[in-house]
Amino acid sequence: MSWKREGFESHEGEVGVLLADGSEPGPVYFDMGSGGYFHESTDWWVYTGHSRRPTATSMRGRCACGWRGTRTFPIDWQQVDRDDLGAYDVSGPQADWEAHLDEVAARTVPLPEDVADLLNRLHERLDELVDDHPLTVLKAANELESAVALFGPLATRFLSGGEEDAVAQVAAALGMTEKAAGLRLRHYRYLTL
Protein backbone atom coordinates (compact mmCIF):
# COMPACT_ATOMS: atom_id res chain seq x y z
CA MET A 1 0.00 0.00 0.00
CA SER A 2 1.43 3.34 -1.01
CA TRP A 3 0.30 6.93 -0.68
CA LYS A 4 0.10 9.37 -3.57
CA ARG A 5 -0.86 12.98 -4.02
CA GLU A 6 -1.89 14.41 -7.36
CA GLY A 7 0.81 16.65 -8.80
CA PHE A 8 3.58 15.05 -6.73
CA GLU A 9 4.03 11.72 -8.51
CA SER A 10 7.74 11.43 -7.69
CA HIS A 11 6.92 11.62 -3.96
CA GLU A 12 5.13 8.31 -3.50
CA GLY A 13 4.99 7.43 0.17
CA GLU A 14 4.71 4.22 2.14
CA VAL A 15 5.37 2.65 5.50
CA GLY A 16 9.06 2.08 6.15
CA VAL A 17 10.39 -0.16 8.90
CA LEU A 18 13.32 -0.21 11.30
CA LEU A 19 15.02 -3.12 13.01
CA ALA A 20 15.77 -3.19 16.75
CA ASP A 21 19.20 -1.63 16.13
CA GLY A 22 17.60 1.34 14.33
CA SER A 23 18.73 0.31 10.85
CA GLU A 24 16.49 0.13 7.81
CA PRO A 25 16.51 -3.39 6.33
CA GLY A 26 17.05 -4.15 2.67
CA PRO A 27 14.45 -5.91 0.56
CA VAL A 28 13.17 -9.40 1.37
CA TYR A 29 13.62 -11.88 -1.48
CA PHE A 30 11.15 -14.65 -2.26
CA ASP A 31 12.17 -17.77 -4.18
CA MET A 32 9.21 -18.49 -6.44
CA GLY A 33 10.57 -21.82 -7.66
CA SER A 34 13.19 -22.70 -10.17
CA GLY A 35 14.77 -20.03 -12.27
CA GLY A 36 16.98 -17.03 -11.78
CA TYR A 37 14.27 -14.55 -10.82
CA PHE A 38 13.59 -13.77 -7.18
CA HIS A 39 10.68 -11.53 -6.26
CA GLU A 40 11.63 -8.81 -3.78
CA SER A 41 9.56 -6.68 -1.45
CA THR A 42 10.06 -3.83 0.99
CA ASP A 43 6.44 -3.86 2.18
CA TRP A 44 6.39 -3.31 5.94
CA TRP A 45 4.44 -6.49 6.65
CA VAL A 46 7.09 -8.87 5.22
CA TYR A 47 9.56 -8.12 8.05
CA THR A 48 7.97 -10.58 10.50
CA GLY A 49 11.08 -12.55 11.41
CA HIS A 50 9.62 -15.72 9.86
CA SER A 51 11.59 -17.78 7.31
CA ARG A 52 14.87 -16.04 8.17
CA ARG A 53 13.46 -12.59 7.41
CA PRO A 54 14.54 -9.68 9.61
CA THR A 55 12.10 -8.61 12.33
CA ALA A 56 10.92 -5.02 12.17
CA THR A 57 10.26 -3.46 15.55
CA SER A 58 8.98 -0.06 14.44
CA MET A 59 7.64 1.80 11.44
CA ARG A 60 7.93 5.31 10.06
CA GLY A 61 6.88 7.20 6.96
CA ARG A 62 9.14 7.13 3.93
CA CYS A 63 9.06 8.73 0.52
CA ALA A 64 10.40 7.74 -2.89
CA CYS A 65 12.45 10.97 -2.86
CA GLY A 66 14.59 9.59 -0.01
CA TRP A 67 12.86 11.39 2.87
CA ARG A 68 12.40 9.35 6.05
CA GLY A 69 10.16 10.30 8.95
CA THR A 70 11.83 11.10 12.25
CA ARG A 71 9.01 9.75 14.41
CA THR A 72 8.79 5.98 14.85
CA PHE A 73 5.82 3.85 15.81
CA PRO A 74 6.12 0.39 17.38
CA ILE A 75 4.82 -2.64 15.48
CA ASP A 76 2.79 -5.11 17.51
CA TRP A 77 2.97 -8.25 15.38
CA GLN A 78 0.30 -9.87 17.58
CA GLN A 79 -2.18 -7.28 16.30
CA VAL A 80 -1.29 -7.61 12.59
CA ASP A 81 -3.98 -9.57 10.73
CA ARG A 82 -2.30 -11.20 7.70
CA ASP A 83 -5.73 -11.43 6.01
CA ASP A 84 -6.53 -7.75 6.54
CA LEU A 85 -3.29 -5.77 6.55
CA GLY A 86 -5.21 -2.56 5.91
CA ALA A 87 -6.78 -2.86 9.35
CA TYR A 88 -3.44 -2.24 11.09
CA ASP A 89 -3.00 1.39 12.13
CA VAL A 90 -0.39 3.10 9.95
CA SER A 91 -1.90 6.56 10.38
CA GLY A 92 1.18 7.94 12.17
CA PRO A 93 3.63 7.22 9.33
CA GLN A 94 1.05 8.41 6.79
CA ALA A 95 0.48 11.68 8.66
CA ASP A 96 4.24 12.31 8.73
CA TRP A 97 4.47 11.66 4.98
CA GLU A 98 1.55 14.03 4.38
CA ALA A 99 3.35 16.71 6.43
CA HIS A 100 6.47 16.10 4.30
CA LEU A 101 4.37 16.65 1.15
CA ASP A 102 2.87 19.81 2.63
CA GLU A 103 6.44 21.12 3.07
CA VAL A 104 7.32 20.14 -0.51
CA ALA A 105 4.17 21.85 -1.80
CA ALA A 106 4.91 25.01 0.21
CA ARG A 107 8.26 25.36 -1.59
CA THR A 108 6.75 25.14 -5.09
CA VAL A 109 6.19 28.11 -7.34
CA PRO A 110 2.60 29.28 -6.88
CA LEU A 111 0.43 29.59 -9.95
CA PRO A 112 -1.16 32.98 -10.51
CA GLU A 113 -4.67 32.86 -9.08
CA ASP A 114 -6.34 33.35 -12.46
CA VAL A 115 -4.34 30.48 -14.02
CA ALA A 116 -5.08 28.15 -11.08
CA ASP A 117 -8.78 29.04 -11.32
CA LEU A 118 -8.82 28.47 -15.07
CA LEU A 119 -7.16 25.04 -14.72
CA ASN A 120 -9.57 24.02 -11.94
CA ARG A 121 -12.58 25.03 -14.02
CA LEU A 122 -11.15 23.16 -17.03
CA HIS A 123 -10.69 19.98 -14.95
CA GLU A 124 -14.25 20.24 -13.64
CA ARG A 125 -15.75 20.86 -17.08
CA LEU A 126 -13.83 18.01 -18.75
CA ASP A 127 -14.91 15.71 -15.93
CA GLU A 128 -18.53 16.65 -16.66
CA LEU A 129 -18.09 15.96 -20.40
CA VAL A 130 -16.00 12.79 -20.47
CA ASP A 131 -18.84 10.25 -20.05
CA ASP A 132 -21.25 11.68 -22.60
CA HIS A 133 -18.90 13.53 -24.98
CA PRO A 134 -15.54 11.70 -25.07
CA LEU A 135 -14.65 13.10 -28.51
CA THR A 136 -15.03 16.63 -27.19
CA VAL A 137 -12.70 15.78 -24.31
CA LEU A 138 -10.18 14.28 -26.76
CA LYS A 139 -10.32 17.46 -28.83
CA ALA A 140 -9.69 19.52 -25.68
CA ALA A 141 -6.80 17.19 -24.74
CA ASN A 142 -5.35 17.71 -28.22
CA GLU A 143 -5.57 21.49 -27.79
CA LEU A 144 -3.87 21.23 -24.40
CA GLU A 145 -1.08 19.08 -25.84
CA SER A 146 -0.53 21.73 -28.53
CA ALA A 147 -0.21 24.40 -25.85
CA VAL A 148 2.24 22.21 -23.88
CA ALA A 149 4.28 21.56 -27.04
CA LEU A 150 4.52 25.31 -27.63
CA PHE A 151 5.07 26.65 -24.12
CA GLY A 152 6.97 23.77 -22.47
CA PRO A 153 10.05 24.06 -24.72
CA LEU A 154 9.81 27.86 -24.68
CA ALA A 155 9.80 28.02 -20.88
CA THR A 156 12.65 25.48 -20.73
CA ARG A 157 14.82 27.74 -22.91
CA PHE A 158 14.24 30.67 -20.54
CA LEU A 159 15.59 28.85 -17.47
CA SER A 160 18.84 30.36 -16.21
CA GLY A 161 22.09 28.58 -15.46
CA GLY A 162 23.46 25.30 -16.73
CA GLU A 163 21.78 21.90 -16.87
CA GLU A 164 22.35 21.10 -13.17
CA ASP A 165 21.07 24.51 -12.06
CA ALA A 166 17.98 24.13 -14.25
CA VAL A 167 17.24 20.65 -12.87
CA ALA A 168 17.51 21.90 -9.27
CA GLN A 169 15.30 24.93 -10.08
CA VAL A 170 12.62 22.79 -11.70
CA ALA A 171 12.71 20.17 -8.92
CA ALA A 172 12.09 22.82 -6.26
CA ALA A 173 9.59 24.82 -8.31
CA LEU A 174 7.43 21.85 -9.28
CA GLY A 175 7.83 19.79 -6.10
CA MET A 176 9.51 16.79 -7.68
CA THR A 177 12.75 14.88 -7.32
CA GLU A 178 15.74 15.99 -9.36
CA LYS A 179 15.54 12.77 -11.38
CA ALA A 180 11.92 13.51 -12.31
CA ALA A 181 12.81 17.16 -13.03
CA GLY A 182 15.59 16.09 -15.38
CA LEU A 183 13.20 13.81 -17.25
CA ARG A 184 10.62 16.60 -17.47
CA LEU A 185 13.20 19.07 -18.82
CA ARG A 186 14.41 16.62 -21.47
CA HIS A 187 10.79 15.90 -22.41
CA TYR A 188 10.02 19.60 -22.90
CA ARG A 189 13.35 20.38 -24.54
CA TYR A 190 12.75 17.92 -27.38
CA LEU A 191 8.99 18.27 -27.66
CA THR A 192 7.81 19.52 -31.04
CA LEU A 193 4.46 20.54 -32.48
Image (cartoon, grey):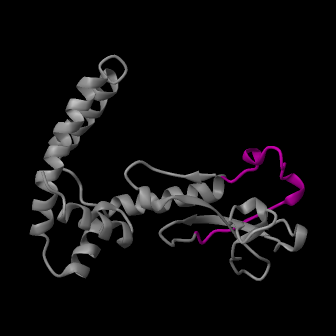
Of residue 70 and residue 148, the one placed in the foreground of this image is 148
Left/right of residue 112 with respect to residue 3 in the rendered view? left
Which residue is located at x 87 percent, y 70 percent?
49
Residue segment shown in magenta: 69-90
Outermost residue toward the front? 35
The stretch drawn in magenta includes residue 84: yes
Left/right of residue 87 with respect to residue 153 in the rendered view? right
Q: Quadrant of residue 115?
A: top left
Q: Main secondary structure of the magenta part?
A: loop
Q: Quadrant of residue 108?
A: bottom left
Left/right of residue 73 with respect to residue 48 in the rendered view? left
Of residue 161 and residue 139, the one placed in the foreground of this image is 139
Which residue is located at x 26 percent, y 81 percent?
164
Which residue is located at x 24 percent, y 60 percent?
109
Of residue 25 and residue 107, the one placed in the foreground of this image is 25
Which residue is located at x 12 percent, y 54 percent?
151
Whether 83 is drawn above or below 175: the answer is: above
User: Could you tell me how many numbered marks the image carries?
Assistant: 0
x%, y% of residue 131?
37, 20
x%, y% of residue 149?
15, 52
The stretch drawn in magenta includes residue 186: no
x%, y% of residue 4?
50, 51
Of residue 106 and residue 170, the one placed in the foreground of this image is 170
x%, y% of residue 125?
27, 26
Left/right of residue 82 with respect to residue 96 in the rendered view? right
